[in-house]
Amino acid sequence: MILKPVATNLITGFLGSGKTTFIKALLANKPAGETWAVLVNEFGEIGIDAGLMGQSDSGVVIREVPGGCLCCAAGVPTQVAVTQLLARAKPDRLLIEPTGLGHPKEILKTLSSKQFAEVLSLKASICLFDPRKLSDKRYSEHENFLSQLQIADILLAGKQDLWQQQEPMILSGDELQSEQGGDLLREQIAAFIAAQQLQGELFYWSKEQKLNDELLRSLTRPAKANLNAKPTYIGAGLLRQNAGVFAIKPLGVEPQSPETPEWDARGIVFKSNEGEGCYSYGWIFAPDWLFDLERLYRWAKALDVVRLKAVMITKDGIAALNMLDGELSVEELDDAMDSRLEIISRAPLPPESLEQQLLSIRVAE
């Protein structure tokens, strides 16, 4: 039984904006003795974000809803997933991360409905964005991207470590003079916020920085999202607007007991998904599969895809790979139940060929 409404933050952002990294930073600030729950919705079918976050803290329960958008079907997936997680985790705080291809306004409407009025206390919603993408019309003129920014109480310009010292750029055909690319992007951010009439409070952050007290306090304030706000421009942009189809999977109680994959004879699971103008291809490899990290890095770097995420067991340890538009990073993790890799592309890809390439990267027994 829930005795008081659970403080709930919606954390949005387009593909590769850094939502998972930010949630990891939030979890590091969890007060001792509290239980926090994280509901992660992924466009792909296999579920990787929970592995990227890590689940070593017994006071953190992470659950995934793979294969689509929580906003589909008039909010039913959101209602089911949130209800299950609240009942089983009984958290002090709930963090919800929708897919970067989703429609956050619909999710907020569901969370604000009478059904959740007595069990959820909606706090500030946050939208992460990479300022370097503001000059890319596939993002800046895309309905979902703009909607995420419009409904946010907090606007978080992330990846500051990557753009702080970059060279000056040419924006809108005019070269803006600045000693540092970071100063130039701040000017662009201010101009974009003014043009879109965004109401959210602006913060800057990178994964190398601790979350400052002002940002943490802002996250505890009541939500003030304008659910009636409309983007000033709605274009076809990067993605189509047809929703993908997915199913809610049962939520377990223990964070260390995920659903067992249904391996084929080789110890592989393959799943794909299509929707919102994108295609996803995902593989799960049994724990006894071991990969060559250097060759895996070169293979991933050569791909021409929108997004790649992976948690892989390699001969050099557990590696987390994260790539957006050719920008690839690798981090070391402490543990993994199996190896998982997922690709999101704007165009159909040959999964059989990709799988053979992955098999060739396996370390021979």
Image (spheres, grey):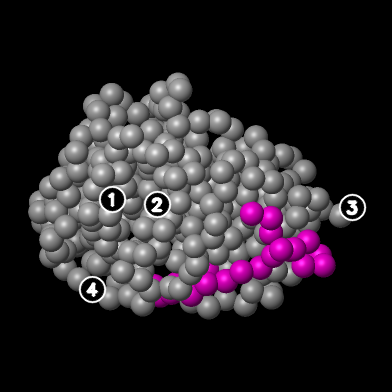
Q: Residue furthest right?
A: 365
Is residue 100 toward the left or the right of residue 47 in the image?
left
Q: Position of residue 66 (x, y in %)?
A: 51, 60
For marks 3 and 1 on the same chain, the one whose residue lies earlier in the sequence: 1
Magenta stretch in the rendered image? 259-280
For marks 4 and 2 on the same chain, the one whose residue lies earlier in the sequence: 2
Q: Secondary structure at mark 4?
A: loop
Most foreground residue, 261 or 252: 252
Answer few, some or many: residues within 10 Å of disc 3's Cα (few below 14, many 20 plus, some between 14 and 19).
Answer: few
Question: Disc 3 and disc 2: Cα gap in Å?
Answer: 43 Å
Disc 4: which residue? 235
For marks 2 and 1 on the same chain, the one whose residue lies earlier in the sequence: 2
Q: Nearer the viewer, mark 3 or mark 2?
A: 2
Question: Disc 3 and disc 4: Cα gap in Å?
Answer: 51 Å
Q: Nearer the viewer, mark 3 or mark 1?
A: 1
Question: Disc 4 and disc 1: Cα gap in Å?
Answer: 33 Å
Q: Position of residue 59 (x, y in %)?
A: 50, 31
Quarter occupied by the N terminus = top left
Disc 2: which residue? 82
Q: Residue furthest front?
A: 1
Is residue 125 toward the left or the right of residue 22 in the image?
left
Disc 1: which residue? 116
Q: Identify which residue is drawn at 68% across, 52% down.
A: 339
- Labels in figure, total: 4
